[in-house]
Amino acid sequence: MDCDVLVVGGGHAGIEAALAAARLGCVVLMVTQNPDAIGRMSCNPAVGGLSKGNLVREIDALGGQMGHLIDRSAIQWRLLNRSRGPAVQAPRAQADKAVYAAEARRSVETQTGLSILMDTVTDLLVSGDRGQVEGVVTERGNRISSRAVIVAAGTFLEGTVFIGDWRARSGRLGEPAALGLGTALRARGFPVGRMKTGTPARIKASSVDLDALEVQHGDTDPFPFSFMTESFRPLDIPCRIAYTNERTHAVIAANL
């Protein structure tokens, strides 16, 4: 099970890291808690936006995968800041979450030189004299040698979910956090911090009076994120827009 490059995590960063190394001829192992969740979109199922859309195209220019994935799964496409100059314009596409994840997993599973292991990395193997990473230890007791280790565990690394006053160790709700590796990194002098993201409640579409909302269609002249995409005709599933008011502000303030 030894490899040249070991990638911890199967999210967006882990996918790009694993594919890049494998395409350079390295023997790569991706270690992820759940192969079925490779490329799963956690919150807002969109790719791009201000700054981010340009970044996706830069990743694509370097041989990355995200541009291809969103081109195959887009259900609405818009160029933000269209009324302004090109310097502040950016593409954004809403994605079919299931299609995006399926395409992401397929790209990983079919890549030559890239293997997937269902496990959780809990510690690093480090040489005593040089202090150089030589591999990892996993939750199931595997000791895997690797010339390089790329940590792309994302928010799952010591993740905590908060719902009101309740909290629990978790990655996405219902999926376990990645525990152990954060402690191992701190023990070796690496700072490990946390960032917060807020996820809105999901609303059942059939329970909403959609006629009362503003309809927003995608642009009629979309262009692909990937420079390699030859045919790009995304679906145009409209978004619905609602606006807050003093009453909604009061409800939010009373429940902070």
Image: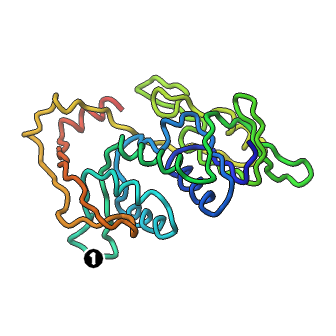
Question: Mark 1 — residue?
Answer: 85
Residues 103 and 11: in front is 103
**The quarter of the displayed image where residue 47 is located:** bottom left
Q: Quadrant of the N terminus?
A: top right
Q: Position of residue 196 (x, y in %)?
A: 48, 42
At 28% from the left and 67% from the top, the residue drawn is: 223
Query: Looking at the image, how many numbered discs can be counted on the residues?
Result: 1
Q: Position of residue 179 (x, y in %)?
A: 64, 32
Q: Quadrant of the C terminus?
A: top left
Position above or below: 230 against 218: below
Q: Position of residue 98 (x, y in %)?
A: 36, 40
At 37% from the left and 58% from the top, the residue drawn is: 48
- Circle 1 packing at 10 Å, graded few (<14), some (14-19), many (20+), is few
What's the colour scheme? Answer: rainbow
Residues 113 and 181: in front is 113
Secondary structure found at label 1: loop
Please state which amino acid type lies under the numbered disc 1: Gly
**The quarter of the displayed image where residue 30 is located:** top right
Q: In this view, does 200 lie to the left or right of 162?
A: left
Q: Residue furthest right?
A: 129
Position above or below: 59 against 242: below
